[in-house]
C-alpha cells in the first residue's frame, strides 16, 4: 500500500513527503482508513511501529477543516502516561500538522501552571497531556472538554500499570458521548479490554 491510496489531503500528504515516508507501516495501513471512516479503533502496537502517525495523521486530516473552538475547549485530547510520551506526541503533532493551521498545547504535571493557563486561555484545537494535571485544569475550569471530538488513549497498558485508571475514567466521564475514541496499547490485557469496552463504541 502507498500513502496516496489513503487519499489524504494535500497538506497532510505534503507533511508525510517531508518526513520521507514512502509507505504506511502495518498499523498505519490498518488504522488510518478506519479512523477516516469515523470508527473507533483499538490498536495493538509497540512504540517504534509508527503508531503515533497511525492516529495523528487521520485525526489531523479530519481536523484540517479548521474551525477554531472557544478558548480552552479542544477538539482532540491525547492522554499519555508519561511526560516523555507527551513530548513525543506533541513533537509528532507539529511535524505532521506543519502545513495546517493548528493550535496545540501540552499539559503536564510538575511544571508551572502559568504557561498552561495562557495556552488554555485561547482557542485551541488539540491538547496532549498526562491525566493528573488535566483533571486539575478541569476542576479549575480552565479546561473544557464538552466539545471534544477525538479522544486518544496512548499506551493504555502503561497508563493502567502506573495507576491512572481512576483519573482516566474521571476524564472520560466528562466527555461528550458522541466522539471518536482511539485506544493504543502495546499489550491488550483483560484490564485494557475492559477499559476499551467502556470507552469505545462497539
Ligand atoms: P512511533 O512508533 O510512533 O514512536 O514511531 C516510530 C518512528 O517511526 C518515528 O521516528 C517515526 O518518525 C517513524 N515513522 C512513522 N511512520 C513511518 C513510515 N510510514 N515510514 C517510515 N518511518 C515512519
Image: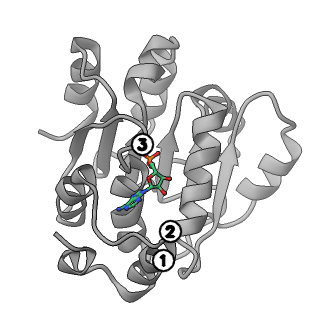
* Residue drawn at the location 84% of the way across and 50% of the way down: 115
The image's mark for residue 53 is none
Of residues 55 and 24, which is closer to you in this image?
24
Residue 73 visible at all: no
The answer to which quarter of the image holds residue 107 is: top right
- Mark 2 vs mark 3: in front: 3
Q: Residues within 10 Å of mark 3 (few under 14, many from 20)?
A: few
Q: Give the image location of residue 128, x and y in percent.
A: 58, 47
For the point 78% across and 47% down, which residue is it? 116
Give the Cα distance between marks 3 and 1.
Answer: 19 Å
Disc 1 residue lies near ligand 1 with CB under 8 A: no
**Disc 3 on helix, strand or loop?**
loop
Q: In which quadrant will I find the C terminus?
A: top left
Asked if residue 6 is positioned above or below residue 157 in the image, the reply reads: below
Name which quarter of the figure residue 86 lies in. Answer: top right
Of marks 2 and 3, which one's residue comes earlier in the chain?
A: 3
Dot label at residue 96: 2
Which residue is the site of mark 1?
Answer: 15
Query: Looking at the image, which residue sits at the far left?
Result: 202
Location of residue 81 in the rendering, given as x and y in whole percent from the top left corner: 54, 28
As drawn, the residue found furthest toward the bottom would be 10
Mark 2 surroundings: few (<14), some (14-19) or many (≥20) residues within 10 A: many
User: Label 3 belongs to which residue?
Assistant: 48
Looking at the image, residue 40 sits to the left or right of residue 171; the answer is: left
Q: Are marks 2 and 1 in contact (CB under 8 Å)?
A: yes
Q: Which quadrant of the figure shows ligand 1?
A: bottom left
Amino acid at each position: 500500500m502507498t500513502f496516496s491510496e489513503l487519499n489524504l489531503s494535500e497538506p497532510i500528504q505534503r507533511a508525510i513527503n517531508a518526513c520521507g515516508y514512502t509507505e504506511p507501516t502495518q498499523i498505519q495501513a490498518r488504522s488510518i482508513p478506519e479512523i477516516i471512516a469515523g470508527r473507533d479503533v483499538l490498536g495493538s502496537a509497540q512504540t517504534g511501529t509508527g503508531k503515533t502517525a497511525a492516529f495523528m495523521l487521520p485525526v489531523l486530516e479530519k481536523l484540517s477543516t479548521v474551525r477554531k473552538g472557544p478558548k480552552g475547549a479542544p477538539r482532540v485530547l491525547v492522554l499519555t502516561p508519561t511526560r516523555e510520551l507527551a513530548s513525543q506526541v506533541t513533537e509528532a503533532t507539529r511535524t505532521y500538522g506543519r502545513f495546517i493551521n493548528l493550535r496545540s498545547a501540552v499539559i503536564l504535571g510538575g511544571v508551572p501552571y502559568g504557561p498552561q493557563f495562557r495556552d488554555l486561555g485561547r482557542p485551541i484545537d488539540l491538547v496532549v497531556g498526562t491525566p493528573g494535571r488535566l483533571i486539575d485544569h478541569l476542576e479549575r475550569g480552565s479546561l473544557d472538554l464538552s466539545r471534544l471530538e477525538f479522544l486518544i488513549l496512548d499506551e493504555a497498558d502503561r497508563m493502567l500499570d502506573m495507576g491512572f485508571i481512576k483519573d482516566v475514567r474521571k476524564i472520560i466521564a466528562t466527555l461528550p458521548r458522541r466522539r471518536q475514541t482511539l485506544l493504543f496499547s502495546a499489550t491488550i490485557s483483560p484490564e485494557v479490554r475492559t477499559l476499551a469496552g467502556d470507552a469505545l463504541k462497539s
